[in-house]
Image: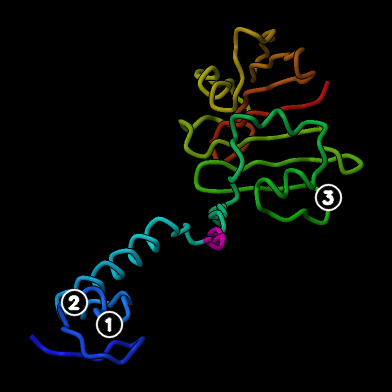
Amino acid sequence: MALVNCKECSGKVSDKAKVCPHCGNKLRPKTTTFTWIATVMIIAVGIQWILIVDRKPEATMPTAQEPAEIYTAPSNPFNANVKNIVSYIDRFNVDAALDFDVDINEGQNVVAENEQYRVLFETQENKIRFISVDIKRSTPCKFGKRIDKFKDYLLETGFNEALLTRNQSANADSFVDQSNGVKVTVICQHSGGSASVNITKL
């Protein structure tokens, strides 16, 4: 047991005493090493708990969206579908030139060509009045003669034969498409021997 001085009266007091026997002052017990360690641990746990409870989700800055992939049409003249070819009747030559990715020629007409087709858009006052689809891979035919498999060529260019009025002649099969206001002719009109589907505004 050790003696310490009372902070109130400076009298000698045991370090185990809780009250000074001289003046009655309450004495603070001596802080032990264990008490210090326990206190520090409690404070550390409390701080951690406060940080966890009060933590707010960090505001996230909106990230810039990746630009959508822009589709670039392949560099061939048939970006448009040849099956919808009748839809170009009465449209401007610029529409066909843009869709088929070709230039308007000096006569204000548009010619689109690839390995399978050659399409001529003839215009009047810059509006398409006549279209000729030359089907290169067709069965060879004789110039000016009627074509046996005309139904196949109608289908290939988007026409339904059941909706057409048929007229036969010596060298061609022609049809009237009232819904689109056009005359459609399947003919072998080129010396090269390939079939053509001609579309003329009525």
Residue at mark 3 to residue at mark 2: CA–CA distance: 117 Å
Q: What element carries label 3?
A: loop
Quadrant of the rendered structure where residue 78 is? top right
Left or right relative to 135: residue 2: left
Residue 176 lies in quadrant: top right
Residue 144 located within the stretch drawn in magenta: no
Q: What residue type is labelled 2?
A: Ala
**Among the two numbered marks 3 and 1 on one chain, the one whose residue lies closer to the N terminus:** 1
- The numbered dot on residue 131 is none
Q: Is the magenta stretch mostly helix, strand or loop?
A: loop
Return the x and y of residue 155 as percentages of the image width and height.
Answer: 54, 21
In the rendered structure, find residue 22 and report the number of the disc placed on it: 1
> Horizontal and vertical percent for residue 199?
72, 27
Residue occupying image coordinates x 76% and y 44%: 95
Where disc 2 sits, the SS reads loop
Extreme residue toward the left, this view: 1
User: Is 139 on the left or on the right of 3, as rendered?
Assistant: right
In the image, farthest residue toward the right: 125
Does 62 sit above or below residue 110?
below
Q: Label 1 is placed on what type of residue?
A: His
What label sits on residue 17 in the rendered view? Answer: 2
Q: Point out the stretch of residues depicted in magenta.
A: 59-66
Q: Earlier in the sequence, mark 1 or mark 2?
A: 2
Task: Depth check: give the residue in front, 68 or 63.
Answer: 63
Percent across and percent down for residue 170 are: 65, 15
Mark 3 against mark 2, which lies toward the viewer?
2
**Residue in the foreground of this view, choosing between 20 and 136:** 20
Give the alpha-carbon distance from disc 3 to disc 1, as whole Å. Answer: 124 Å
Position of 28 with respect to 125 (left or right) is left
